[in-house]
Image: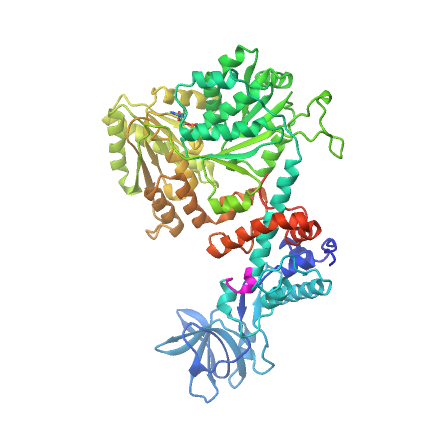
Amino acid sequence: MNTTPPAKPPQTHAQRALAKLGLLRDIDFCLHLPLRYEDETHMTALRDARHGETVQIEAMVTSCEIQFKGKRQLVVIVVDGDGVEECTLRFFNFYPSHQRTMAVGEQLRIRGEIKKSLLGWSMLHPSFKPAGGELSQVLTAVYPTSAGLPQGYIRKAVWGGLLRAAQRGELAPTAVIAHLPSLADSLELLHHPTPDVSVTELEDKSHPAWQRLKAEELLAQQLSQLQARRERAKMQAHGLSQSDRGVVFELLKVLPFKLTTAQTRVQREIATDLALAKPMNRLLQGDVGSGKTVVAALAAAQCIEAGFQCALMVPTEILAQQHFAKLVGWLEPLLTARGLCVAWLSGTQKAKERREMLAKIESGEAALVVGTHAIIQSKVTFAKLALVVVDEQHRFGVAQRLALIQKTTPLSSDEDIAPTAQGQSNINPHLLMMSATPIPRTLAMSYYADLDVSTIDELPPGRTPIVTKIVAMTKRDEVVRRIVDQLKAGRQVYWVCPLIEESEAVDLVNATETHAALQAALTVALPSAKVELLHSKISTPEKKSIMQAFEKNEVQVLVSTTVIEVGVDVPNATLMVIEHAERFGLAQLHQLRGRVGRGLWPSACVLLYATNESGRLGDAAKARLKAMVDTTDGFEIARRDLDIRGPGEFLGARQSGAQMLRFADLSQPQDQDWLKWAQATAPVLLDTKLDMALRHVERWLPSGASFMGA
Ligand code: ADP
Ligand code: MG
């Protein structure tokens, strides 16, 4: 078997358009499968037609005229065979050529969806050509295409690719699967199905030929991840050994609470990984409020105890400051005693402060560095980075995570580390990614096979369940009354306004108006209450001071755009109002709701929604709001989110550019079985037939791409 020769760079306009669709190599064309099929293999007589069916008929034109029934239209009447049955063809867009081809007396071959009403048969915008000519022997494939690439062109290109690949033996099997046709036969069948093949089985992808493709695709995915995992196993990291009475021990002593069983378990999992001289690649998932920060702090403590630096990267400045405050509170006394400190980095920091921080990071005095993606800038040099923690990891792209990993510095030469082929040390930092958006199990198995997962599956004690209510925007007044009740009881309230990406100015107006309206309403009901507004245009120091005032209960109502989305922790806040909740994604709604229910009091989340002009709420929006009311379990939310959005959006693959599964659909039980098969087959294949395994991956992955994972 030969490998696919490298693709030539696209030349013509059409080739460029094909390349845009990812169609470069012959194998790419082979795997460009039809969207649907048209059955042009037989003719239907009108008297045998069924309502709603797509049919092909041959009939004679008996009338052709332009009519004005509400709208200008071309109405053509045809009769078939014995002249008993009539069908009316209707065209709203038409040219003089239509009238010429469909002149009275002409015989036509017509194809389209046929409808039956009291007025008889009709078709809207059918395709037509002069009658006669041979009937197709196979179902006609209709391919996904783009503007400027006619169906006929792409069909020819695909078939050409299929022929060349087959002739060169490129479709030789990787694995034999009982009861399934070979890859070559499967492709032949999917591109040129004979009329006896069930179109339904082709279109719902249950046909054995489709099963073969899904199985092979999943095998490629698992092979590529297993390979990545084995590559990583060869890399080295600083083993972070722990002593009995070091920083970890002291940190546990100063914490104001006892770790939950789940926290203790995941902390041990992480500690065990960190002690090894190979890089950890672990996802820590736990619902909003489950206490991931302290687990990260303990990992950092272990790293610092071993004499190395830890970087903690967070997606927003507010969160960076919060983490900073908390971690400093916990860790700084312990670090100061050792002559170390905590540094922080952000994009908006003053130049002087920044220089000081950079110097401390470079000298190694800053044992812990907290910051936004300012951390991955090239000017930041770590003296001895050994652990990277990424909070809310789904908010970062794969590229950003990689940039941070590459900041690790090699061990000094006397520590005898094997250099790689390039002569560099292959030391990598341990990586801990944290997320409150759990990845559903099937997705994790499939896309993150290269990742270990720790799960915090319990909340700290004393949390009260949050009640979620959906309320129409028209009933805002009731919500304001609820706010007053909470404030009178001494509690605090969040009010979140949506961010419409196209226009920050409009958002600001909305948020400002909401703020003013609440202020006015509360002045009457509760004059002592203070309402503050937080949004992206407010300067960082001011944001910080507003947040601090809210934390100290000097401000009781915080109106905000989604800047508070992640991580903010004010246990006295018990009511979360989300305005235009229908515009938010499910994960975001769940995150926002997680800002309340953190203290001893019963908490509530009000989802205010507005309908569109026709008084309706879209299906997806409805499904999201319903999910929020039905459950507060982050895993269940994630599962529903996957149903609503599909894996591509879910995993943020669109931003990262990573390759998604094209054919396998992991929500299907049968495909889950193929995933298990692929997981069992991949290691055997890599061990026994490495060449074939690599070829298989290459077949499925355009050069350079990879299936997810960092
Ligand atoms: P998340 O997992 O969403 O990042 P945090 O780490 O912000 O959650 O923790 C939420 C709150 O719970 C914080 O106030 C934190 O101090 C507190 N917390 C964490 N662990 C415990 C525990 N074991 N017992 C009591 N409170 C805890
Ligand atoms: Mg958090």
Image point 60% across, 15% down: which residue? Answer: 365
Q: Is residue 590 above or below residue 548?
A: below
Q: Which stretch is magenta?
A: 205-211
Q: Position of residue 435 (x, y in %)?
A: 48, 35
Rendered image quadrant of residue 231: top right
As drawn, is 497 to the left or to the right of 244? left
Q: How many marks?
A: 0
Quadrant where the image shows the C terminus: top right
Image point 27% across, 33% down: which residue? Answer: 480
**Quick one: 587 or 120, which is closer to the camera?**
587
Image point 61% across, 51% down: which residue? Answer: 220
Q: Is residue 572 visible?
A: yes
Q: Position of residue 638 (x, y in %)?
A: 43, 43
Q: How is colour applied across the structure in the image?
A: rainbow
As drawn, is 4 to the left or to the right of 524? right
**Quick one: 99 or 281, which is closer to the camera?**
281
As drawn, is 45 to the left or to the right of 529? right
Image point 38% across, 20% down: which residue? Answer: 549
Q: Position of residue 534 (x, y in %)?
A: 41, 28
Query: In the image, is residue 206 part of the stretch drawn in magenta?
Result: yes
Rendered image quadrant of residue 53: bottom left
Rendered image quadrant of residue 211: bottom right
Q: Position of residue 604 (x, y in %)?
A: 30, 34
Q: Is residue 538 visible?
A: no
Query: In the image, is residue 493 part of the stretch drawn in magenta?
Result: no
Quadrant where the image shows the N terminus: bottom right
As drawn, is 286 to the left or to the right of 171? left
What residue occupies the far bottom of the structure in this picture? 82
